[in-house]
Image (tube, rainbow, N blue to C red):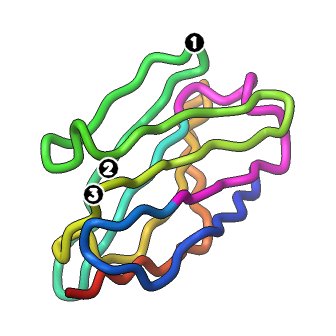
Amino acid sequence: VQLQASGGGLVQAGGSLRLSCVASRSINSINVMGWYRQAPGKQRELVATITSRGGTNYADSVKGRFTISKDNAKNTVYLQMNSLKLEDTAVYYCNALSYSLNNYWGQGTQVTVSS
């Protein structure tokens, strides 16, 4: 599976961004899709995931502010990010976990939140 992430950019604190991740094949055939992020000097961390059935999971730090969703017809997963904080600054990566437990990563998109 190839994943193409987009939508990052520079935004002021309190603002919003929407990330998109387009998969090269039907996401109906993918077990779990998700977003991870990695800030400078830190380990990559889970942001949010969505299962093939639509079940979602969020990191505590983004609950109530971020929403993960998907459009099966477009093979696309979205991450709507609202009320952005300085600490949300990171490179955001799209991830796909297949039913055979193979992990696939997109190229990452930079999100920078300024004060």
Pointers 2 and 1 in contact (CB under 8 A)? no
Name the residue located 56 percent from the left edge and 59 percent from the top edge: 19
Which residue in the structure is indicated by mark 1?
53
The foreground one among 8 and 50 is 8
Q: Earlier in the sequence, mark 2 or mark 1?
A: 2
- The residue range painted magenta reads 18-32
Q: Which SS class for mark 3?
A: loop
Q: Which SS class for mark 2?
A: strand
Q: Amino acid at mark 3?
A: Ser
Q: Which mark is residue 65?
A: none
Give the class, few, some or many, for how many residues have Cα within 10 Å of label 1's Cα (few <14, many ≥20): few
Instruction: Report the magenta stretch's main SS.
Output: strand
Q: Is residue 49 above or below residue 87?
A: above
Q: Closer to the camera: disc 3 or disc 2? A: 3
The alpha-carbon separation of the residues under discs 3 and 1 comes to 27 Å
Which residue in the structure is indicated by mark 3?
83
> In the rendered image, which quarter contains the C terminus?
bottom left
Q: Which mark is residue 47?
A: 2
The foreground one among 114 and 59 is 114
> Where does the image place residue 60, in percent across and percent down from the top left?
14, 41
Name the residue located 28 percent from the left edge and 45 percent from the top edge: 65
Q: Amino acid at mark 2?
A: Val
Quadrant assignment, res 48: top left
Q: Earlier in the sequence, mark 3 or mark 1?
A: 1
Q: Amino acid at mark 1?
A: Arg
Q: Which SS class for mark 1?
A: loop
> Where does the image place residue 12, in percent across and percent down from the top left?
32, 80
> Where does the image place residue 13, in percent across and percent down from the top left?
25, 74
Name the residue located 84 percent from the left edge and 39 percent from the top edge: 74
